[in-house]
Structures are given as structure tokens and as C-alpha cells.
Amino acid sequence: MMRETCEAAPAVEAKHGEAALVARARRGDGPAFEQLHAKYRNRLFTLCLNMCGQREEARDLLQETLLRAWRGVRRFDGRSEFSTWLYQIAVNVCRDALRKRRPALAYAPSPPEKDAVAVAHVREALGRLREPYRLVLVLRYNLALSYVEIADYLRWTLPQVKMTLHRAKLAFRDAYTQTEENEP
């Protein structure tokens, strides 16, 4: 019993520390916001990259997300987790960017990384999916959100999340298979 309490203490302290940073950022404290930015930057970048598929665009979308967050942090009311609020801003920024794209613009995966072929195939397959499917896959597998967190985040019912995620997996499998078949 004592061990559980000791192990839970760092999580509680981290949560309290983040709440203090958020409170300072809401008062206009730039360094506090920078600490929050540093904590979430990689996850936000991954979200943007998987939503748009292009590294340079993802960097721009990340910057736009952080700018909007800084401008709006005073209005953050704490009804949700700070991370959820940030992810919502990032998704909205990405949605706006995707709407502005011309339909003829081809989805171009970013330069390969570790496993070049697999990464390119995954990004291309994600790019072929409808936006809700891409979004739930990114939230579940890139941000590791639970079904309940996704439902809260998207303001969907739990069955809606489960069904959409199931359909997204099937659509991704088909898109990925097509990507592999089209490889020269």
C-alpha cells in the first residue's frame, strides 16, 4: 500500500507542477509557457506531421499551434487537461490547413527516417484516409490516448470512437496495401 502511494506521488507532483506552469502562463509568464511548450512540442509535431504528411508544413503548423495557444492561454479554463486543449488547437490548425489545400495537391511523404520504406508507406496511407479516420488513428496510436480520452477530446460517444477507430483501421489496412502494391 505504501509503495503505491510513493509511486503515485511523482505523478501528482508533476500534475501540480504543470498546473502551476499553466497558471503562470495564464498570467502572461513567457518562460512558463516555454516550459509547457517544451513538454508537448514533440507530441504536437507528431500530430501535425501525421495530419498533414509533410515535415516543413508540420513545422509551420506546430508554430501556428503554439502561437494560437500563447494568444489564447488566458482563456484556458481548466475544464480539460492542458494537453487536450493543446491537441485541440493543433487539430484545428491542421484541419484549416488541409481545407486550404488544393484538391490536386498530391500527398507527399516527408523524407524517410529509420525504416524509410515503411515510414513512407504509413504516411502515404494516412494521407489517403478521410480526415476523421486519420485523426482517430493519430490520437490513438501516435498520442496513445485511451478510447475514453479520445471520446472526451472529440466530444463523441464511446461507441462512436470504437466504431470510427475500427473503420479507420480497415481503411488504413486497405490504403497501406494499395501503397505497397503501387511501389515500383
Image (cartoon, rainbow, N blue to C red):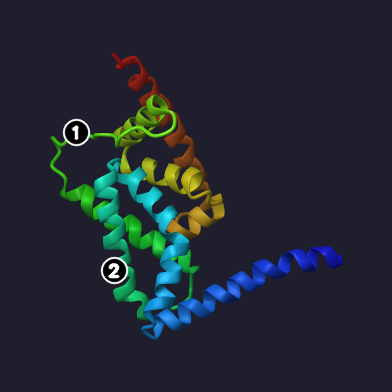
> Residue 69 location, x and y as percent?
34, 69
Residue identified by numbered label 2: 68
Q: Is residue 160 visible?
A: no
**Residue displayed at 36% across by 83% down:** 28
- Image coords of residue 76 (percent x, y): 40, 76
In which quadrant of the rendered image does the C terminus lie? top left
157, above or below 73, in the image: above
Where is residue 166? Give x, y as percent: 49, 36
Figure label count: 2
Mark-to-mark CA distance, 2 and 1: 28 Å
Instruction: Please tell me which residue lies in front, 110 or 176.
Output: 110
Residue type highlighted by circle 1: Ala
Tell me which numbered mark, 2 or 1, is placed earlier along the sequence.
2
Q: Quadrant of the N terminus?
A: bottom right
The picture places residue 91, in percent across and down from the top left corner, at 34, 55
| Residue at the disc numbered 1 | 106
Residue occupying the point 53% across, 77% down: 19
Give the side of residue 8 with respect to residue 42, left or right: right
Q: Name the one closer to the observer, 100 or 113.
A: 113
- At 40% from the left and 48% from the top, the residue drawn is 46
Label 2 residue SS? helix
Question: Vertically, is 97 above or below 111?
Answer: below
The residue under the point 47% across, 40% down is 165
Farthest right residue?
A: 1
* 10 Å crowding of disc 1: few (<14), some (14-19), many (20+): few
Type of residue at label 2?
Arg
